[in-house]
Amino acid sequence: MSKVSDAKFFNEFIDMVDLCCSLGWNERNGGNMSYRISEEDIAQIKDEFSYDKDWAEIGVTVENLANEYFLVTGSGKYFRYTKADPENSVCIALIDETGTKYKIVWGLVSGGRPTSEFPTHLLNHSVKKDITDGKHRLVMHVHPVNTIALTFVLPQNDKDFTREIWDMMPECAVVFPRGIGILPLMLTGSIDIAKATAEKFKTYDVVVWSMHGIFSSGEDFKSVFGIIETVEKAAEILVKVISMGGKKIRPTAEQIVEVCEEYNLDINKSLL
């Protein structure tokens, strides 16, 4: 087994791709994921890298990610088959010293390129690296059914969408006390949606793309999956509540704040 495929972060990445697919979050080649690899991990696997490929334009500038390495899913690659054939499904890409280009140094052995959403991922990584002092390393994009369904019926603004989700379970405000950002339907893979998502990530750790899916960021695989899992469970409850005629009761803003104060969390009260 190669050093790359034996690395803990690599196997956690592949297992997460497989888990998301098993939940129905990533049909066909839908969804993508990227992980900013630590210097310690790179030191253990770097001798397997090849630097022969040409540099490619990212389409955005991410100066604070210069010389960083990312494990990222490939464009057009199916999550369902990633675990069986990871070297053809994912790659490790190096960002150049200007933060404007990338080069594949490992993976995608039969050809290909990183996900078409790579610019969005990198802008999100750039924002979160700054505001979390480098703690956030993972960005995940998936297509959870109930969350997507709600974007067709709920108001498309951060305050109303967040409050509807927070109302469903006390855990919601605890898991994502900053709330949820939401964007209207936009062209996927475009620089416009990349910039719009990154702007939302300055405030939120989870952003919903209307009629499309979720983007989330966090320190590790468990935390990012946990946020998305909680949003989607709350969305499922809300879909059922709406199907039963809508809410007859709801928690008060004071009750939601009380839960967060119990855990010493600074909830975004502007969304209440």
Image: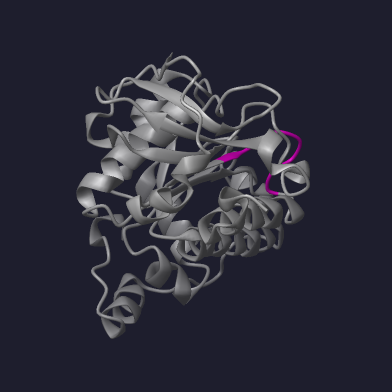
Residue 163 image offset from top left, x and y in percent: 41, 58
Can residue 57 be seen?
yes
Can residue 242 be seen?
no
Name which residue lies at 63% across and 65% down: 237
- Is 85 left, or right, of 15 in this rendering? right
Residue 157 image offset from top left, x and y in percent: 39, 41
**Is 19 included in the stretch rendered in magenta?**
no
Label the magenta part by its dominant secondary structure.
loop
- Is 240 left, or right, of 13 in this rendering? right
**Is 29 included in the stretch rendered in magenta?**
yes
Residue 215 vertical position relative to residue 135 in the rendered view, above or below? above
Q: Quadrant of the C terminus?
A: bottom left
| Residue situated in front as seen by the camera: 43 or 203 | 43
- Disc tally is 0
| Residue situated in front as seen by the camera: 42 or 81 | 42
Residue 105 vertical position relative to residue 218 in the rendered view, above or below? above
Residue 127 image offset from top left, x and y in percent: 27, 41
Name which residue lies at 71% across and 24% down: 110
From which residue to which does the magenta span run? 25-32
Residue 116 vertical position relative to residue 228 in the rendered view, above or below? above
Name which residue lies at 46% across and 32% down: 93
